Image: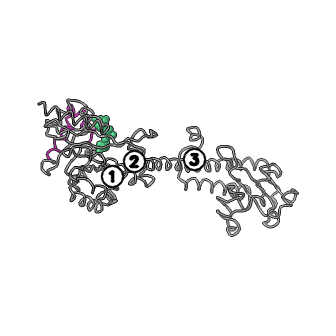
C-alpha cells in the first residue's frame, strides 16, 4: 500500500485531479492540432467518456456519453489489429471497415491504453480528427504518452481513494453492526475520603486497526456515523448502572452533536438520572449552542449532571464552562501531569478551584499518575481525582471488586 502511495504521490482533491486530466487532454489535442481528445473508461462493454476536450463539438461528444466497445477502435488497438498512430484512416482497411470511421467521420487517430494498478485496462487516452493528419509520427506518440501517464496516475489515485473510503466505511459499519467493543470502568475518587464515588465508562474496540478509541469515533464522525456509534456505546455503558450500588454514579462521554441529536433523554429514561454524569468534551466544535442548551436543559431537568471534559486542554478555551455552567469540571490530564513541580499549572488549577467554588461546581483532576500529583491537587482544594495511580480502566467485575474492597475497609475500620 505504501508503495502505491509513493507512486501516486500526495493526495489531491477530486477537483484537482480532474483539472490535471482536462489540462492533459487539451494540451495534447492542441499540440497535435486535432479536434477531439478524450479519456474513456471501459464499463460493461461500453467505452464511457470520462473527460473530453473538444471545443465547439460538445453536441457530438461530452463527458458521460458512451459508445459500444464493438463499434470503436479501442479493442482493436489493444489487440494490435490497429496501430496506436493512424495518420490517415483511409490507409487502414480494418478502420475503413468500421462504420464509425465514415459516420463520425474519423480521418486520423492516436490512442494510448490507460491501465489500472493491477495492469488491467481501464480505458483509453485518445486524440482524433475528422481529417487525415499526415504529420503524425512516433515523436507525437511519445509526447502524448507523457500526458497519458500523468492522467493514468490521476485515475489510479482516484480509484485508490475511493477504495480506501469504502474500506473505512465497511470497518466502521461492521463495528456498529457487531457492537464490537467492550466497556471499561475507571474509578473516580473522592480525594477527601479516598473512596471511589463514581466510574467513567470508556469504550475499548475489539478491532485494533486504530489503537486509540478516539480515532474510531473521529472516523465514524467523518462518515456521518458518529452519533450512531456514540449512542450505541452510551446504551452499553448505561447497562453498568444496574450492577453498581445506588450510591455510585456513572460518567458517560458524549459529543455536543450526540447531545443535540435529542436521543439521550429516551436512553436515560429507564435509569435513575441523578446517577448519570454526562461528560461533554471541550474540543468538540459546537454547531449550535441553542440546540445544545435546550437538550442539556431537558437532561439536567431529569437530574443528569453535566461535566465538561478535558478542561484546560486548550481546544476551545473556557467557552463551554462559561456558557454551560457545568456541575463538574474535569481538569485535563495535561494540567495534572507534573502539577506538583509546575507552578504555572498549579496557578491555573487554583484559579479553576476558585471559579468552581464560586459557581458551585466540583473539580475532578484527570490523569493522576503519581502520589505527588494526587497530594498537590488535594492540597489546592480539588475534591475528586481519577488516574492510573488511583485505578485503571477495568471490567465491570473489577469495578465491583474495587467497591467491595473499599466496603470491607470501611467495615473493618
Ligand atoms: O478524554 P477523556 O478524559 O474521556 O479520556 C480518558 C482517557 O484517558 C481514557 O482512554 C483513559 O484510558 C485514559 N486515562 C485515564 N487515566 C489516565 C492516566 O492516569 N494516565 C494516562 N496517560 N491516561 C489515562
Ligand atoms: Mn471523559
Q: Is mark 3 within 8 Å of ligand 1?
A: no
Q: Nearer the viewer, mark 2 or mark 3?
A: 2
The CA span between labels 2 and 3 is: 23 Å
- Residue 242 falls left or right of residue 150: left
Q: Describe the element under mark 3 as helix, strand or loop.
A: helix
- Would you place residue 9 above or below residue 36 in this image? above
Q: To which residue does mark 1 refer?
A: 255
Q: Describe the element under mark 1 as helix, strand or loop.
A: loop
**Where in the figure is residue 107, as x and y percent of width and height?**
81, 61
Magenta stretch secondary structure, dominant: helix
> Which quadrant holds the N terminus?
top right
Q: To which residue does mark 3 refer?
A: 160
The magenta stretch is 332-354
**Where in the figure is residue 328, as x and y percent of width and height?**
20, 48
Q: Earlier in the sequence, mark 2 or mark 3?
A: 3
Task: Mark 2: give few (<14), some (14-19) or many (20+) Cα within 10 Å.
Answer: some
Q: Earlier in the sequence, mark 1 or mark 3?
A: 3
Q: To which residue does mark 2 refer?
A: 217
The CA span between labels 1 and 3 is: 31 Å
Residue, x 21% and y 59% (percent of image)? 301
Ligand 1 is located in which of the four quadrants? top left
Q: Describe the element under mark 2 as helix, strand or loop.
A: helix
Residue, x 55% and y 54% (percent of image)? 14
Q: Name the foreground residue: 318 vs 265.
A: 265
Query: Do callouts 1 and 2 mark residues in contact (Cβ within 8 Å)?
Result: yes
Q: Name the foreground residue: 159 vs 249.
A: 249
Q: Quadrant of residue 412?
A: top left
**Where in the figure is residue 19, as x and y percent of width and height?**
59, 56
Amino acid at each position: 500500500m505504501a508503495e502505491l502511495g509513493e507512486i501516486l504521490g500526495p493526495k489531491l482533491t477530486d477537483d484537482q485531479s480532474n483539472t490535471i486530466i482536462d489540462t492533459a487532454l487539451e494540451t495534447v489535442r492542441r499540440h497535435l492540432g486535432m479536434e477531439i481528445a478524450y479519456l474513456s473508461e471501459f464499463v460493461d462493454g461500453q467505452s464511457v467518456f470520462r473527460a473530453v476536450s473538444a471545443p465547439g463539438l460538445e453536441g457530438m461528444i461530452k463527458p458521460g456519453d458512451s459508445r459500444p466497445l464493438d463499434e470503436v477502435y479501442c479493442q482493436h488497438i489493444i489487440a494490435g489489429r490497429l496501430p496506436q498512430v493512424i495518420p490517415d484512416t483511409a490507409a487502414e482497411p480494418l478502420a475503413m471497415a468500421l462504420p464509425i470511421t465514415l459516420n463520425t467521420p474519423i480521418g486520423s487517430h492516436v490512442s494510448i491504453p490507460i491501465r489500472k494498478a493491477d495492469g488491467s485496462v481501464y480505458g483509453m487516452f485518445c486524440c482524433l480528427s475528422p481529417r487525415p493528419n499526415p504529420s503524425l509520427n512516433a515523436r507525437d506518440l511519445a509526447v502524448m504518452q507523457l500526458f497519458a501517464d500523468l492522467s493514468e496516475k490521476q485515475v489510479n489515485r482516484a480509484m485508490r481513494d475511493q477504495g480506501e473510503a469504502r474500506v473505512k466505511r465497511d470497518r466502521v459499519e461492521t463495528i456498529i453492526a457487531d457492537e464490537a467493543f467492550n466497556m471499561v470502568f475507571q474509578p473516580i475518587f473522592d480525594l477527601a475520603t479516598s473512596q471511589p464515588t463514581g466510574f467513567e465508562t470508556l469504550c475499548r474496540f475489539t478491532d485494533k486497526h486504530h489503537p486509540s478509541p478516539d480515532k474510531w469515533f473521529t472516523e465514524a464522525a467523518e462518515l456521518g456515523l458518529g452519533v450512531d456509534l456514540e449512542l450505541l456505546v452510551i446504551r452499553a455503558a448505561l447497562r453498568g448502572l444496574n450492577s453498581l450500588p445506588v450510591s455510585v454514579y456513572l460518567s458517560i462521554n458524549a459529543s455536543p452533536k450526540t447531545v443535540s441529536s435529542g436521543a439521550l433523554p429516551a436512553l436515560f429514561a429507564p435509569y435513575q438520572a441523578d446517577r448519570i454524569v454526562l461528560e461533554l468534551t471541550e474540543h468538540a466544535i459546537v454547531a449550535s449552542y441553542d440546540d445544545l442548551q435546550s437538550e442539556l436543559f431537558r437532561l439536567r431537568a431529569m437530574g443528569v449532571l453535566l461535566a465538561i471534559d478535558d478542561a484546560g486542554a486548550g481546544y476551545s478555551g473556557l467557552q463551554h464552562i462559561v456558557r454551560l455552567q457545568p456541575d463538574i469540571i474535569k481538569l485535563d490530564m495535561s494540567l495534572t501531569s507534573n502539577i506538583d513541580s509546575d507552578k504555572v499549572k498549579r496557578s491555573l488549577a487554583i484559579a479553576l478551584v476558585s471559579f468552581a467554588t464560586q459557581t458551585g461546581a466540583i473539580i475532578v483532576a484527570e490523569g493522576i499518575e503519581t502520589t505527588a500529583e494526587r497530594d498537590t491537587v488535594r492540597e489546592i482544594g480539588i475534591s475528586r481525582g481519577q488516574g492510573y495511580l488511583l485505578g485503571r480502566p477495568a471490567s465491570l467485575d473489577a469495578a465491583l471488586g474495587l467497591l467491595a474492597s473499599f466496603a470491607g475497609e470501611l467495615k473493618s475500620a
